[in-house]
Image (cartoon, grey):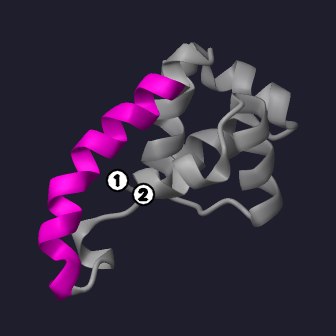
Amino acid sequence: MELGSAVKVIRKEKGFTQKELASKCNISTNALCSIENNKTIPSKATLNKICECLNVPNAYLLFLCITDEDIPAESSTLFKALYEPMKKVLLEDISSNS
């Protein structure tokens, strides 16, 4: 999952519209839309603000962005076994902290 897609998934889990989240983060709705559509990569400061407004640790967001291509071949089997269960746990935690 790309960074913007992960932001979108978490935003929806938290029940925010793009307009609401953008306003909370002091960015334009167009900027958030561009991030969520993976057209732009947010600055570190913007990413921190998005995570803060969503009440989600940066590590959760970054974990959701990891793909098979990011993992060395020798660790691929372990990654494939652990990724989906970990993703489920993180998304459940995100949902419970709404």
Residue range (magenta): 73-93
Q: How many marks?
A: 2
Against 5, residue 81 (above or below) is below
Q: Residue at x 43, y 45 (%)?
A: 5
Q: Secondary structure at mark 2?
A: loop
Contact, CB < 8 Å: mark 1 with mark 2? yes
Q: Residue at x 50, y 50 (%)?
A: 4
Does the magenta run of residues contain 81?
yes
**Mark 2 burial class by Cα count in 10 Å: few <14, some 14-19, many 20+:** some
Against 37, residue 12 (above or below) is above
Against 16, residue 37 (above or below) is below
Give the image location of residue 2, x and y in percent: 41, 57
Nearer to the camera, 47 or 41: 47
Nearer to the camera, 93 or 27: 93
Give the image location of residue 92, x and y in percent: 42, 24
Q: Secondary structure at mark 1?
A: loop
Q: Is residue 61 left or right of residue 89?
A: right
Q: Quadrant of the C terminus?
A: top right
Question: Which disc number belongs to residue 65?
Answer: 2
Against 77, residue 11 (above or below) is above
Q: Is residue 63 left or right of residue 78?
A: right
Q: Is residue 68 visible?
A: yes
Give the image location of residue 83, x and y in percent: 27, 52
Q: Residue at x 58, y 40 (%)?
A: 33
Disc 1 marks a residue whose amino acid type is Met
Q: Which residue is mark 1?
A: 1
**Majority secondary structure of the magenta segment?**
helix
Give the image location of residue 89, x and y in percent: 38, 33
Q: Residue at x 18, y 67 (%)?
A: 78
Mark-to-mark CA distance, 1 and 2: 5 Å
Does the magenta run of residues contain 76?
yes
